[in-house]
């Protein structure tokens, strides 16, 4: 019996930090560890979801379908989840993921655009997948509008709806407001996905659980975009202290984090000046590495780029604006 389902996103959100360069052997090792630790679902895909490998979002070193197949082959109990952002991924990508071994799909849209995921939600259910709607950049809409978007996802057939703090911007009381409102307004389960740009991922995850969320995302060693996500192994320890059942073995989840993930981290998942500004300004967490590159290319302060991106209320898919803003800042010097 699990009171809370912890879904690990190391092999999807972590792809951002790894510059989409996970190897088959790395995926196999992490998958084995997660399965041994009794994680129920873990996500495997390009950081921007199925079909994300591109010049704009970053090319994958290994085709994501091969990574899904490799992960699925290592699992006895754990199931593979995938993320699909309509417009980046298409319905055929979902079919291919199922053939590769996926058992869950999370259809991700901007927080005000659930309607563009209707067909993908329906197809996911038809394919027999556990299906979630994923409302990204949840800080960018008032609670009432988030409720309406969640109700749309429910009407399309979603079994779970996620409040997704893509920028690591939300404060705990804002998470509570959003989760409570959904709990009162939809009949499906509620999930929460945090980023740690303001050092609030754990606090926000606990606030979500207290308000009624039953699906919580985590990543091993916090491996993820920006400053990473709620740290899976720490989350399991905290929930165990609170008497909340997750079904995850604490020692085994610590072992996979420390022995398998830690040695491959390209850099520590810490709150740097830039990722902190990202949370402060409300900028999509996957913009971090793109912003660092643009700052070097145009000789400007990456924090200035992030502040301007926040002012412009940029969202995922607008990576081209990072370079436009950097160039404008250079010319204005």
Image (tube, helix red, strand yellow):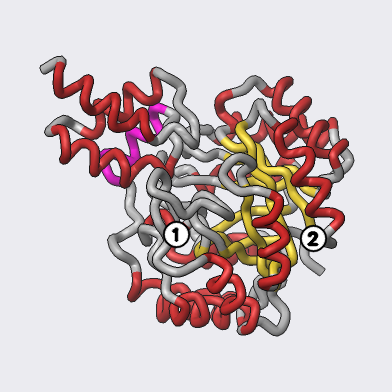
Residue at image position (37%, 61%) is: 18
Q: Is residue 275 magenta?
A: yes
Q: Is residue 315 left or right of residue 6?
A: left
User: Image point 66% across, 62% down: which residue?
Assistant: 81
Whether residue 6 is visible here, answered yes or no, is yes
Q: Main secondary structure of the magenta part?
A: helix
Say whether residue 164 is left or right of residue 314.
right
Could you classify mark 1 by the number of other residues whose Cα lies within 10 Å: few (under 14), some (14-19), or many (20 or more)?
many
Q: For the C terminus, which image quadrant? A: top left
* Circle number at residue 129: 2
* Residue 254 rendering spot, x and y as whole percentages: 49, 75
The spot of residue 78 in percent (x, y) is 69, 75
Figure label count: 2
Report the disc number at residue 68: none
| 207 with respect to 125 (left or right) | left
Q: Position of residue 29 (x, y in %)?
A: 49, 82
Q: Secondary structure at mark 1?
A: helix
Contact flag, marks 2 and 1 (Cβ < 8 Å): no
Q: Is residue 179 magenta?
A: no
- Which percent across, then down, holds residue 86? 64, 41
Residue linked to disc 1: 15
Q: 246 or 324, which is in the foreground?
A: 324
**In front of the other: 303 or 171:** 303
Rendered position, 312 above or below 196: above
Q: Is residue 206 visible?
A: no
First reached walking from the N terminus: tag 2 or tag 1: 1
Residue numbers of the magenta segment: 272-281
Query: What is the distance, in whole Å, between disc 2 and disc 1 at their CAs?
Result: 23 Å
Secondary structure at badge 2 equals loop
């Amino acid at each position: 019996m699990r009171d809370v389902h912890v879904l690990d996103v190391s092999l999807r959100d972590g792809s951002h930090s790894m510059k989409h360069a996970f190897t088959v052997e790395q995926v196999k090792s992490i998958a084995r560890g997660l399965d041994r630790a009794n994680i129920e679902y873990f996500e495997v895909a390009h950081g921007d979801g199925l079909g994300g490998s591109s010049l704009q979002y970053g090319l994958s070193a290994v085709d994501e379908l091969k990574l899904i197949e490799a992960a699925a082959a290592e699992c006895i109990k754990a199931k593979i989840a995938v993320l699909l952002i309509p417009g980046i991924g298409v319905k055929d990508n979902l079919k291919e993921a199922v053939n590769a071994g996926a058992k869950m799909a999370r259809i991700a849209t901007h927080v005000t655009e659930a309607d563009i995921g209707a067909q993908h939600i329906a197809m996911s259910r038809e394919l027999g997948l556990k299906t979630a709607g994923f409302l990204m950049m949840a800080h960018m809409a008032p609670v009432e509008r988030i409720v309406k978007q969640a109700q749309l996802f429910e009407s399309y057939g979603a079994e779970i709806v996620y409040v997704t703090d893509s920028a690591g911007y939300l404060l705990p009381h804002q998470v509570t407001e959003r989760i409570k409102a959904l709990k009162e307004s939809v009949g499906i389960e509620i999930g929460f996905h945090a980023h740690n740009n303001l050092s609030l991922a754990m606090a926000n995850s606990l606030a979500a659980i207290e308000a009624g969320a039953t699906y919580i995302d985590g990543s091993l060693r916090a491996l993820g975009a920006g400053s990473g996500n709620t740290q899976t192994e720490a989350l399991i320890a905290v929930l165990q202290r609170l008497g909340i059942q997750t079904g995850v073995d604490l020692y085994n989840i610590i072992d996979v984090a420390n022995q398998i993930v830690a040695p491959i981290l390209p850099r520590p998942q810490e709150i740097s000046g830039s990722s902190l500004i990202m949370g402060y300004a409300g900028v999509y967490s996957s913009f971090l590495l793109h912003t660092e590159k643009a700052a070097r290319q145009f000789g400007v302060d990456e924090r200035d780029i992030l502040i301007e991106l926040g002012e412009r209320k940029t969202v995922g898919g607008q990576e081209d604006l990072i370079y436009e803003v950097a160039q404008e800042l250079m010319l204005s010097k």
